[in-house]
Image (spheres, grey):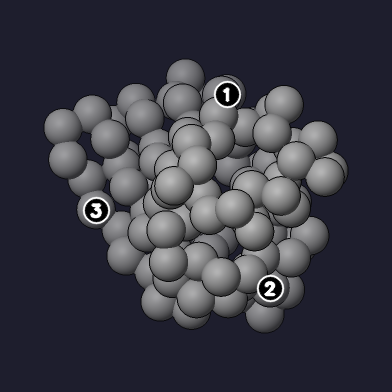
Amino acid sequence: MPTNFSTSGNITRINLSGEFDFSSQEELNQIFAKALDTSQPAIEVDLQNTIFIDSSIIRMFLKLHETAQRNHKTLKIVNCNERIYEIFTIGGFDQIFDIQEA
């Protein structure tokens, strides 16, 4: 479950790679908190190399989205592969998140 965190211009980018489930929550929580603490107004989560997420991770995305909005930041999920995009759409989360497919 490697993650990479970077900032460039107005964007804080979080690259997730591998599988993410309940056991990944602590690491992701730290990374999401770090992204929220930056001065950049936009957060992008890149899922290009992510092969699996479960419902606990979707809950974390919801919390990140809510906190970002409260802090006047935007959240965008980018490079979402077809399999993970389907997970978001089945639950109707594509209506909440700004998701860009790969």
- In the picture of the structure, the residue carrying the numbered disc 1 is 70
Q: Residues within 10 Å of mark 1 (few under 14, many from 20)?
A: few
Tell which tag, 1 or 3, sits nearer the viewer: 3
> Disc 2 vs disc 3: Cβ atoms closer than 8 Å?
no
Front residue (pair 96, 73): 96
- In the picture of the structure, the residue carrying the numbered disc 3 is 6
Picture quadrant of residue 29: bottom right
Query: Where residue 25 sits: x, y (%)?
Result: 63, 69
Closer to the N terminus: mark 1 or mark 3? 3
Q: Residues within 10 Å of mark 2 (few under 14, many from 20)?
A: some
Query: Where residue 66 sits: x, y (%)?
Result: 64, 32
> Disc 1 vs disc 3: Cβ atoms closer than 8 Å?
no
Query: Where residue 13 sits: x, y (%)?
Result: 32, 47
User: Which residue is depicted at the point 72% across and 73% down?
Assistant: 22
User: Which residue is depicted at the point 36% across and 30% down?
Assistant: 42
Separation of residues labelled 1 and 3 (CA atoms):
22 Å
For badge 1, the amino acid type reads Arg
Residue 61 left/right relative to 9: right
Residue extending farthest right: 91
Q: Can residue 36 be seen at all in this image of the molecule?
A: no
Separation of residues labelled 1 and 2 (CA atoms):
26 Å
Closer to the N terminus: mark 2 or mark 3? 3
- In the picture of the structure, the residue carrying the numbered disc 2 is 21
For badge 3, the amino acid type reads Ser
Tell which tag, 1 or 2, sits nearer the viewer: 2
